[in-house]
Image: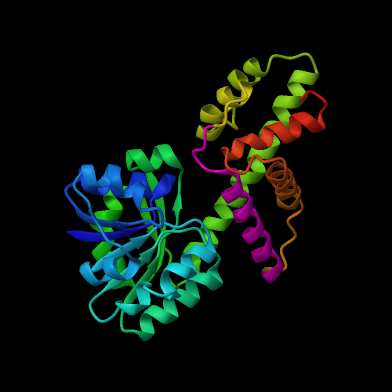
Amino acid sequence: MEVGFLGLGIMGKAMAANLLRHGFRVTVWNRTLSKCEELVAMGATVGDTPVAVVAKCKYTIAMLSDPSAALSVVFDKDGVLEQIGEGKGYVDMSTVDAATSCKISEAVKQKGGAFVEAPVSGSKKPAEDGQLVILAAGDKALYDDMVPAFDVLGKRSFFLGEIGNGAKMKLVVNMIMGSMMNAFSEGLCLADKSGLSPQTLLDVLDLGAVANPMFKMKGPSMLQGSYNPAFPLKHQQKDMRLALSLGDETAVAMPVAAAANEAFKKARSLGLGDLDFSAVHEVLKGAGGSA
């Protein structure tokens, strides 16, 4: 199976590499073409532009940073729309809002192509291990065609129906994750300021009802002040903003998420946006007077 892959950031690079390791023929593109070199060494070919990739491949996957990037790759000069058409499918796995997905879907369908949105739950390590959770919606026939690729990229894929549902589900998931990270950071700070061992707190949490992989994976590095980016904080804050906008549209009160978003915004203002989203801990440590 031959697929195109647009966007080789932290997630996209790991996902494209997984496809190559499992025998897929992959043509890649990235704005910074030098990021393609490692994948070329694994057997990928390079397209100079998004339109070149779509022209070559029946199926093209995109994994881009935000709604602006997702729209640009489709609508700008040398973009996806210039070659998408009958018999071709476009799968956007970026985390965007539902309105962005709907705009892309309508444009692709007008050209005769098929579209699926398929944002993922999971960060760098699950992407490398093929353990993502894929939240797909849109053209069911294209989804079925992509299942072999989704089975390589993820441990499970969900088909959620009409376009927009995948985007909404992903925003809800990341809103919960961001809120949890803030509560976790506050707990670590409170334990420390109360004379307790934060490491012991991690051990206690791991044995109780709130044990979860995120606390187990992020906690030790947070205590060391190490924030190598598996999921950059700037992207987490973007997802909080989009989730809060969805809350505005649906008249859902989200005071916890709103407070968490302010902490992520503060972290960005302090220059922490390119670090892992767990670096919000530094903001909360500062608020507690221990920074």
Q: Quadrant of the C terminus?
A: top right
Q: Quadrant of the N terminus?
A: bottom left
Q: What residue is shown at x 46% (from left), y 72% (from top)? A: 163
Tell whether 216 sits left or right of 3: right
Front position in the image: 163 or 224: 224
Quadrant for residue 204, please give it.
Answer: top right
Front position in the image: 18 or 81: 81
In this rendering, is residue 211 above or below 254? above
Q: Would you say residue 133 is visible in this rendering?
A: yes
Q: Is residue 283 magenta?
A: no
Return the x and y of residue 283 as percentages of the image width and height: 73, 35
Return the x and y of residue 145 as percentages of the image width and height: 24, 65
Q: What residue is shown at x 29% (from left), y 77% (from top)? A: 83
Quadrant for residue 279, please give it.
Answer: top right
Colour basis: rainbow
- Point out the stretch of residues depicted in magenta: 228-249
Return the x and y of residue 95 as percentages of the image width and height: 50, 58
Q: Is residue 246 magenta?
A: yes
In this rendering, is residue 284 above or below 152? above
Front position in the image: 177 or 234: 234
In this rendering, is residue 162 above or below 148? below
Quadrant for residue 93, please give it.
Answer: bottom left
In this rendering, is residue 256 above or below 89? above
Q: Would you say residue 155 is visible in this rendering?
A: no
Residue furthest to the bottom in view is 110
Q: What residue is shown at x 24% (from left), y 60% (from top)? A: 3
The kind of secondary structure the magenta stretch mainly shows is helix
Tell whether 52 sits left or right of 231: left
Tell whether 8 sits left or right of 189: left
Return the x and y of residue 253 as percentages of the image width and height: 75, 60
Marks counted in the figure total: 0
